[in-house]
Amino acid sequence: MARSVVAVAIVAIIFVYFLPRVVDYGEVWAAVRAMTWLELLTLASLAVWNQATYWLIEMSARPGLEFRQAMKITQASTAISNTLPGGAALGAGLQIAMYSSYGFARRDIALSLALTGLWNTFVKLGMPIVALSLLAIGGNAGGALVAAPIVGVLILIGTILAFAVVLRSEQGALRVGQRLGAILAVAARLARRSPPGAWGATLADFRLRTVDLLSRRWAHLTAATLLSHVTLYVVLLLTLRHVGVSNEAVSWEEALASFAFVRLLSALPITPGGLGVVELGMTATLVAAGGDEALVVAAVLVYRLLTFVLPIPVGALSFFFWRHEVTHHKLAGSKLAGTDQDFHTSNRTEPR
């Protein structure tokens, strides 16, 4: 409850206090209304395609997952993540439930969630490095922009090394699992909960299944993840251009830097889906790069409407259809079981 109150307070302060001090919302609305229907249609189409790339990521990490199933799982879990405090964990729980309803084993589900999360983390950590490199080539990389990529590089290197140790050998997986288990055991004692199980053996089994899956699907997973992140950035860039922020005011490299750094910041669970934090961060960085305040805020709000707000009702509908599908299958199973029982009863030989 306290977390929800804090999240609502942060969002309210950002939208009611900070952003109005930067720009008049009336000017923002005027900039949005100035866009043509063709421009709005182009943005909407690109935003729909961006949502579809998330489905491709799920399908690439879980062989046998159908397109419509991936759509329902992704959209429903995204809606949860974007609306509730701690939504990422709740969204993962919903994903597990939906995967299970489609007949996938728990350990395969865990592997899919782990790999998609890891690949997304790799790209999130790597994009600020790419953005800084592009800015440095153009001579626009200031000292303030260096800190975040350095931290990202260190985390990325550490994550890759740990992942490489796990995949290299069974003994490496056992060692990493045992150390992770020891850390979790300490945390469990502090939280007065039961200690975790044998993490060494668990991680060794995870390694075998990961090696098998990645040997067949690593290219698909990598391509789908990169496509998803790049498409999301293109939605932001095209929105900036459609509202009138020219390349002379904010270059595509500066837009990429803003996108990458704020995405890295939004990974912290401050508010659901980074609501308020993303808007404020992008506004600050894009205006600092040279963009007009009203045009930048208009672009950021339209971008967030397309990529954050609209997926919520779509996700709600996806959840509704999934629940209807599950209920229908349960009823069909019950009727089939009843019919089978009636058949055996009617053909049972009566005692003489």
Image (cartoon, helix red, strand yellow):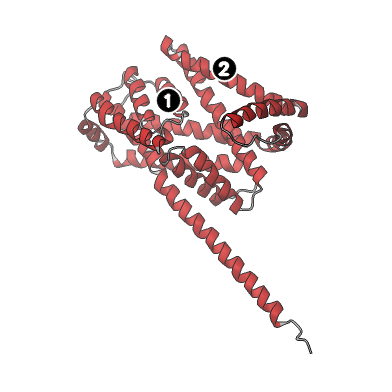
Percent x, y of residue 223:
58, 33
Q: Secondary structure at mark 2?
A: helix
Percent x, y of residue 242:
32, 32
Crowd band around label 2 with a 10 angstrom C-alpha radius: few (<14), some (14–19), many (20+) = few
Q: Which residue is mark 2?
A: 154
- Amino acid carrying label 1: it is Val
Q: Is residue 254 shown left or right of residue 52? A: left
Identify the residue at horizontal 74%, vertical 28% (top origin). 174
Q: Secondary structure at mark 1?
A: helix
Q: Which residue is mark 1?
A: 262
Percent x, y of residue 69:
55, 50
- Amino acid carrying label 2: it is Leu
Marks counted in the figure total 2
Task: Specify the quadrant of the image occupied by residue 243.
Answer: top left
Identify the residue at horizontal 69%, vertical 82% (top origin). 346
Can residue 123 be seen at all in this image of the molecule? yes
